[in-house]
Amino acid sequence: MKQYHQFLQNILDHGTPKTDRTGTGTRSIFGAQMRYDLADGFPLLTTKKTHFKSIIHELLWFIEGSTNIQPLVKNGVRIWNEWPYQSFQQSADYAGETMQEFVEKIKTDDAFAAQYGELGPVYGKQWRAFEGREKTVDQLLDVIEAIKHTPDSRRLIVNAWNPPLIDQMALPPCHMMFQFYVSEGKLSLQMYQRSADAFLGVPFNIASYSALLMMVAQVTHLTPDTFIHTIGDGHIYNDHMEAVHTLLTRESRPLPTLALNPAIADIRDFTMADFTLENYDPHPAIKAKVSV
Protein backbone atom coordinates (compact mmCIF):
# COMPACT_ATOMS: atom_id res chain seq x y z
CA MET A 1 0.00 0.00 0.00
CA LYS A 2 2.94 2.31 -0.56
CA GLN A 3 0.84 4.16 -3.19
CA TYR A 4 -1.61 5.22 -0.48
CA HIS A 5 1.14 6.29 1.93
CA GLN A 6 2.76 8.34 -0.84
CA PHE A 7 -0.61 9.96 -1.52
CA LEU A 8 -0.87 11.03 2.15
CA GLN A 9 2.71 12.31 2.17
CA ASN A 10 2.10 14.27 -1.03
CA ILE A 11 -0.81 16.06 0.61
CA LEU A 12 1.29 16.85 3.67
CA ASP A 13 4.22 18.10 1.58
CA HIS A 14 2.45 19.92 -1.23
CA GLY A 15 -1.17 20.47 -0.20
CA THR A 16 -2.88 23.84 0.01
CA PRO A 17 -4.87 24.91 3.09
CA LYS A 18 -8.52 25.18 2.11
CA THR A 19 -11.87 25.88 3.69
CA ASP A 20 -14.62 23.32 3.18
CA ARG A 21 -18.35 22.72 3.48
CA THR A 22 -18.04 21.14 6.95
CA GLY A 23 -16.12 24.07 8.48
CA THR A 24 -13.30 21.76 9.60
CA GLY A 25 -10.67 22.88 7.11
CA THR A 26 -8.36 20.72 5.04
CA ARG A 27 -4.98 20.43 3.39
CA SER A 28 -5.70 19.56 -0.23
CA ILE A 29 -4.15 18.58 -3.56
CA PHE A 30 -5.87 18.31 -6.94
CA GLY A 31 -5.29 15.38 -9.26
CA ALA A 32 -3.81 12.11 -8.00
CA GLN A 33 -3.78 8.55 -9.24
CA MET A 34 -2.96 5.22 -7.60
CA ARG A 35 -2.79 1.78 -9.22
CA TYR A 36 -3.33 -1.53 -7.42
CA ASP A 37 -2.46 -4.82 -9.10
CA LEU A 38 -4.76 -7.38 -7.53
CA ALA A 39 -2.21 -10.10 -8.26
CA ASP A 40 -0.14 -8.57 -5.43
CA GLY A 41 -2.90 -9.24 -2.88
CA PHE A 42 -6.12 -7.58 -1.82
CA PRO A 43 -5.42 -3.86 -1.15
CA LEU A 44 -6.80 -3.56 2.36
CA LEU A 45 -4.75 -1.13 4.44
CA THR A 46 -2.46 -2.79 7.00
CA THR A 47 -1.04 0.29 8.76
CA LYS A 48 -4.37 0.64 10.55
CA LYS A 49 -7.16 -1.87 10.99
CA THR A 50 -9.88 -1.25 8.43
CA HIS A 51 -13.32 -2.76 9.04
CA PHE A 52 -13.68 -5.13 6.10
CA LYS A 53 -17.24 -6.25 6.88
CA SER A 54 -18.49 -2.65 6.77
CA ILE A 55 -16.89 -2.20 3.35
CA ILE A 56 -18.58 -5.29 1.92
CA HIS A 57 -21.96 -4.62 3.54
CA GLU A 58 -21.93 -1.12 2.06
CA LEU A 59 -20.92 -2.45 -1.37
CA LEU A 60 -23.71 -5.04 -1.33
CA TRP A 61 -26.10 -2.25 -0.28
CA PHE A 62 -25.05 -0.24 -3.35
CA ILE A 63 -25.54 -3.27 -5.58
CA GLU A 64 -29.02 -3.88 -4.14
CA GLY A 65 -29.95 -0.33 -5.14
CA SER A 66 -30.82 0.57 -1.55
CA THR A 67 -30.78 4.17 -0.32
CA ASN A 68 -31.99 3.71 3.28
CA ILE A 69 -29.52 3.15 6.10
CA GLN A 70 -31.66 0.55 7.92
CA PRO A 71 -30.01 -2.48 6.25
CA LEU A 72 -26.58 -1.07 7.10
CA VAL A 73 -27.55 -0.31 10.70
CA LYS A 74 -28.89 -3.84 11.17
CA ASN A 75 -25.46 -5.13 10.13
CA GLY A 76 -23.59 -2.81 12.49
CA VAL A 77 -22.37 -0.49 9.73
CA ARG A 78 -22.08 3.15 10.86
CA ILE A 79 -20.66 4.72 7.69
CA TRP A 80 -23.78 6.68 6.75
CA ASN A 81 -25.33 7.45 10.14
CA GLU A 82 -24.09 11.02 10.54
CA TRP A 83 -26.04 12.54 7.64
CA PRO A 84 -29.56 11.29 8.46
CA TYR A 85 -28.98 11.96 12.16
CA GLN A 86 -28.07 15.55 11.36
CA SER A 87 -31.26 15.86 9.30
CA PHE A 88 -33.33 14.32 12.11
CA GLN A 89 -31.91 16.82 14.59
CA GLN A 90 -33.36 19.61 12.46
CA SER A 91 -36.85 18.06 12.39
CA ALA A 92 -39.86 18.80 14.59
CA ASP A 93 -39.75 15.19 15.88
CA TYR A 94 -36.29 15.55 17.42
CA ALA A 95 -36.50 15.35 21.22
CA GLY A 96 -32.84 15.26 22.18
CA GLU A 97 -32.17 11.68 21.09
CA THR A 98 -28.51 10.71 21.06
CA MET A 99 -26.92 9.16 18.01
CA GLN A 100 -27.16 5.76 19.73
CA GLU A 101 -30.88 6.23 20.38
CA PHE A 102 -31.44 7.38 16.81
CA VAL A 103 -29.64 4.33 15.42
CA GLU A 104 -31.67 1.99 17.65
CA LYS A 105 -34.92 3.53 16.38
CA ILE A 106 -33.75 3.14 12.78
CA LYS A 107 -32.95 -0.50 13.50
CA THR A 108 -36.21 -1.42 15.23
CA ASP A 109 -38.88 0.98 13.94
CA ASP A 110 -39.61 0.52 10.23
CA ALA A 111 -41.83 3.58 9.96
CA PHE A 112 -39.20 5.77 11.63
CA ALA A 113 -36.51 4.30 9.36
CA ALA A 114 -38.61 4.98 6.27
CA GLN A 115 -38.91 8.64 7.27
CA TYR A 116 -35.51 9.37 8.79
CA GLY A 117 -33.20 6.70 7.40
CA GLU A 118 -33.60 7.69 3.76
CA LEU A 119 -30.63 9.32 2.06
CA GLY A 120 -32.27 10.27 -1.20
CA PRO A 121 -31.19 9.00 -4.63
CA VAL A 122 -27.57 8.20 -3.70
CA TYR A 123 -25.24 5.56 -5.16
CA GLY A 124 -27.51 2.52 -5.20
CA LYS A 125 -30.30 4.40 -6.93
CA GLN A 126 -27.96 5.72 -9.62
CA TRP A 127 -26.20 2.39 -10.17
CA ARG A 128 -29.40 0.37 -10.49
CA ALA A 129 -32.14 2.84 -11.53
CA PHE A 130 -30.68 5.94 -13.15
CA GLU A 131 -33.63 8.06 -14.28
CA GLY A 132 -33.33 9.59 -17.70
CA ARG A 133 -35.82 11.72 -19.59
CA GLU A 134 -37.64 8.77 -21.11
CA LYS A 135 -36.45 5.64 -19.28
CA THR A 136 -34.75 4.25 -16.19
CA VAL A 137 -31.42 2.49 -16.71
CA ASP A 138 -29.90 -0.31 -14.62
CA GLN A 139 -26.33 0.81 -15.28
CA LEU A 140 -24.67 -1.97 -13.30
CA LEU A 141 -26.43 -4.89 -14.99
CA ASP A 142 -26.13 -3.19 -18.38
CA VAL A 143 -22.37 -2.75 -18.04
CA ILE A 144 -21.95 -6.39 -16.98
CA GLU A 145 -23.82 -7.51 -20.09
CA ALA A 146 -21.71 -5.17 -22.21
CA ILE A 147 -18.49 -6.63 -20.76
CA LYS A 148 -19.71 -10.10 -21.75
CA HIS A 149 -20.81 -9.23 -25.27
CA THR A 150 -18.81 -6.15 -26.36
CA PRO A 151 -15.65 -6.29 -24.22
CA ASP A 152 -13.73 -3.84 -26.43
CA SER A 153 -16.32 -1.11 -25.90
CA ARG A 154 -15.10 2.22 -24.57
CA ARG A 155 -18.49 2.77 -22.95
CA LEU A 156 -18.20 0.33 -20.05
CA ILE A 157 -19.17 3.08 -17.60
CA VAL A 158 -21.35 3.49 -14.52
CA ASN A 159 -22.07 7.11 -13.55
CA ALA A 160 -23.49 8.12 -10.16
CA TRP A 161 -23.40 11.88 -10.83
CA ASN A 162 -26.97 12.84 -11.79
CA PRO A 163 -27.11 16.67 -11.71
CA PRO A 164 -30.91 17.17 -11.53
CA LEU A 165 -31.04 14.99 -8.40
CA ILE A 166 -27.95 16.23 -6.53
CA ASP A 167 -29.95 18.52 -4.22
CA GLN A 168 -32.12 15.55 -3.18
CA MET A 169 -29.13 13.53 -1.95
CA ALA A 170 -27.90 13.55 1.64
CA LEU A 171 -24.39 13.67 0.17
CA PRO A 172 -23.60 14.03 -3.55
CA PRO A 173 -21.53 11.12 -4.87
CA CYS A 174 -17.85 11.39 -4.00
CA HIS A 175 -16.80 8.31 -6.00
CA MET A 176 -18.88 9.43 -8.92
CA MET A 177 -17.95 7.34 -11.97
CA PHE A 178 -16.19 4.11 -12.85
CA GLN A 179 -15.13 2.46 -16.10
CA PHE A 180 -14.12 -1.10 -16.96
CA TYR A 181 -11.46 -2.19 -19.45
CA VAL A 182 -10.95 -5.69 -20.87
CA SER A 183 -7.62 -6.88 -22.24
CA GLU A 184 -6.39 -10.43 -22.92
CA GLY A 185 -8.93 -12.04 -20.63
CA LYS A 186 -8.30 -9.60 -17.78
CA LEU A 187 -10.62 -6.95 -16.35
CA SER A 188 -9.49 -3.62 -14.92
CA LEU A 189 -11.52 -0.86 -13.31
CA GLN A 190 -10.81 2.86 -13.02
CA MET A 191 -12.82 4.99 -10.61
CA TYR A 192 -12.95 8.79 -10.55
CA GLN A 193 -13.49 10.36 -7.14
CA ARG A 194 -14.27 14.09 -7.09
CA SER A 195 -13.67 14.44 -3.34
CA ALA A 196 -11.55 12.11 -1.22
CA ASP A 197 -11.22 12.13 2.57
CA ALA A 198 -7.67 10.78 2.49
CA PHE A 199 -7.51 9.31 5.97
CA LEU A 200 -11.00 7.92 6.64
CA GLY A 201 -12.59 7.44 3.25
CA VAL A 202 -9.90 6.46 0.77
CA PRO A 203 -8.89 3.12 2.39
CA PHE A 204 -12.57 2.09 2.24
CA ASN A 205 -12.87 3.24 -1.39
CA ILE A 206 -9.78 1.28 -2.46
CA ALA A 207 -11.01 -1.95 -0.89
CA SER A 208 -14.62 -1.47 -2.02
CA TYR A 209 -13.84 -0.95 -5.69
CA SER A 210 -11.20 -3.69 -5.67
CA ALA A 211 -13.87 -6.07 -4.33
CA LEU A 212 -16.33 -4.82 -6.96
CA LEU A 213 -13.72 -5.48 -9.66
CA MET A 214 -13.31 -9.05 -8.40
CA MET A 215 -17.08 -9.60 -8.34
CA VAL A 216 -17.65 -8.30 -11.85
CA ALA A 217 -14.65 -10.26 -13.14
CA GLN A 218 -16.08 -13.46 -11.69
CA VAL A 219 -19.55 -13.03 -13.20
CA THR A 220 -18.06 -12.14 -16.62
CA HIS A 221 -15.53 -15.03 -16.58
CA LEU A 222 -12.49 -12.75 -16.58
CA THR A 223 -9.44 -12.38 -14.33
CA PRO A 224 -9.34 -9.29 -12.11
CA ASP A 225 -6.34 -7.19 -13.02
CA THR A 226 -5.83 -3.58 -11.87
CA PHE A 227 -7.84 -1.11 -9.85
CA ILE A 228 -6.94 2.46 -10.81
CA HIS A 229 -8.01 5.16 -8.36
CA THR A 230 -8.16 8.67 -9.85
CA ILE A 231 -8.84 11.50 -7.43
CA GLY A 232 -9.86 15.13 -7.94
CA ASP A 233 -9.69 16.95 -4.59
CA GLY A 234 -7.70 14.73 -2.25
CA HIS A 235 -7.61 16.17 1.25
CA ILE A 236 -6.65 15.58 4.86
CA TYR A 237 -8.96 17.22 7.37
CA ASN A 238 -7.17 19.42 9.88
CA ASP A 239 -8.38 17.28 12.77
CA HIS A 240 -6.93 14.15 11.12
CA MET A 241 -3.34 15.41 10.93
CA GLU A 242 -2.13 13.68 14.10
CA ALA A 243 -3.74 10.41 12.99
CA VAL A 244 -2.05 10.65 9.58
CA HIS A 245 1.36 11.22 11.14
CA THR A 246 0.82 8.21 13.41
CA LEU A 247 -0.12 6.01 10.46
CA LEU A 248 2.92 7.08 8.45
CA THR A 249 5.27 5.94 11.23
CA ARG A 250 4.05 2.36 10.87
CA GLU A 251 5.56 -0.31 8.64
CA SER A 252 3.28 -1.93 6.08
CA ARG A 253 2.56 -5.62 6.50
CA PRO A 254 1.85 -8.22 3.77
CA LEU A 255 -1.47 -7.75 2.04
CA PRO A 256 -4.28 -10.19 2.78
CA THR A 257 -6.05 -12.28 0.17
CA LEU A 258 -9.74 -12.19 -0.67
CA ALA A 259 -11.59 -15.23 -2.00
CA LEU A 260 -15.09 -15.14 -3.47
CA ASN A 261 -17.54 -18.01 -3.54
CA PRO A 262 -16.93 -19.37 -7.07
CA ALA A 263 -20.52 -20.63 -7.33
CA ILE A 264 -21.90 -17.07 -7.65
CA ALA A 265 -22.67 -16.23 -11.28
CA ASP A 266 -24.98 -13.21 -10.82
CA ILE A 267 -23.70 -10.11 -9.03
CA ARG A 268 -27.07 -9.74 -7.30
CA ASP A 269 -26.61 -13.08 -5.54
CA PHE A 270 -23.50 -12.22 -3.50
CA THR A 271 -23.94 -12.11 0.29
CA MET A 272 -21.50 -11.41 3.09
CA ALA A 273 -20.95 -15.15 3.48
CA ASP A 274 -19.46 -15.29 -0.04
CA PHE A 275 -16.36 -13.27 0.92
CA THR A 276 -13.41 -14.83 2.73
CA LEU A 277 -10.61 -12.53 3.86
CA GLU A 278 -7.45 -14.39 4.79
CA ASN A 279 -4.15 -13.42 6.43
CA TYR A 280 -5.17 -9.90 7.40
CA ASP A 281 -2.75 -8.77 10.14
CA PRO A 282 -3.10 -4.99 10.47
CA HIS A 283 -1.77 -2.52 13.02
CA PRO A 284 -4.40 -1.28 15.51
CA ALA A 285 -7.18 1.03 14.37
CA ILE A 286 -6.69 4.80 14.58
CA LYS A 287 -9.82 6.72 15.49
CA ALA A 288 -10.77 9.94 13.72
CA LYS A 289 -13.93 12.02 13.48
CA VAL A 290 -16.11 12.10 10.37
CA SER A 291 -16.71 15.64 9.11
CA VAL A 292 -20.32 16.23 8.01
Image (cartoon, rainbow, N blue to C red):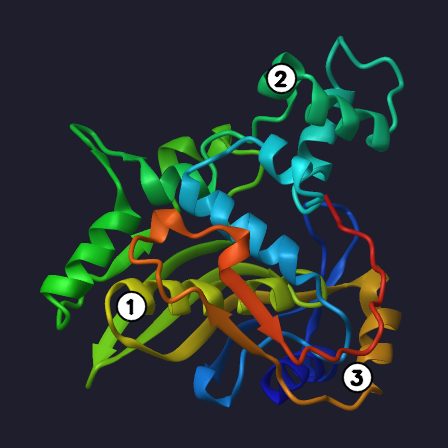
Secondary structure under tag 1 reads strand
The numbered dot on residue 97 is none
Residue type beneath disc 2: Asp
Query: Which numbered disc, 1 or 2, marks the residue closer to the eye?
Result: 2
Quarter location, residue 15? bottom right
Residue underneath mark 2: 110
What residue lies at 57% left-to-right and 40% top-to-bottom? Answer: 171
What residue lies at 62% left-to-right and 12% top-to-bottom? Answer: 111
What residue lies at 23% left-to-right and 62% top-to-bottom? Answer: 156
Quarter location, residue 249? bottom right
Front-lying residue, 56 or 69: 56
Answer above or below: position of 4 versus 102.
below
In primary-sequence order, the first of circles 3 and 1 is 1
Residue underneath mark 1: 180
Q: Position of residue 187 (x, y in %)?
A: 29, 75
Answer above or below: position of 238 versus 32.
above
Query: Which numbered disc, 3 or 2, marks the residue closer to the eye?
Result: 2
The crowd level at tag 2 (other Cα within 10 Å; few <14, some 14-19, many 20+) is few
Front-lying residue, 135 or 271: 271
Front-lying residue, 182 or 14: 182
Q: Is residue 208 visible?
A: yes
Residue type beneath disc 3: Leu
Q: How many marks?
A: 3
Q: Position of residue 291 (x, y in %)?
A: 75, 49
In primary-sequence order, the first of circles 3 and 2 is 2
Q: CA distance from mark 3 to mark 1?
A: 32 Å
Q: Is residue 162 visible?
A: no
Secondary structure under tag 3 reads helix
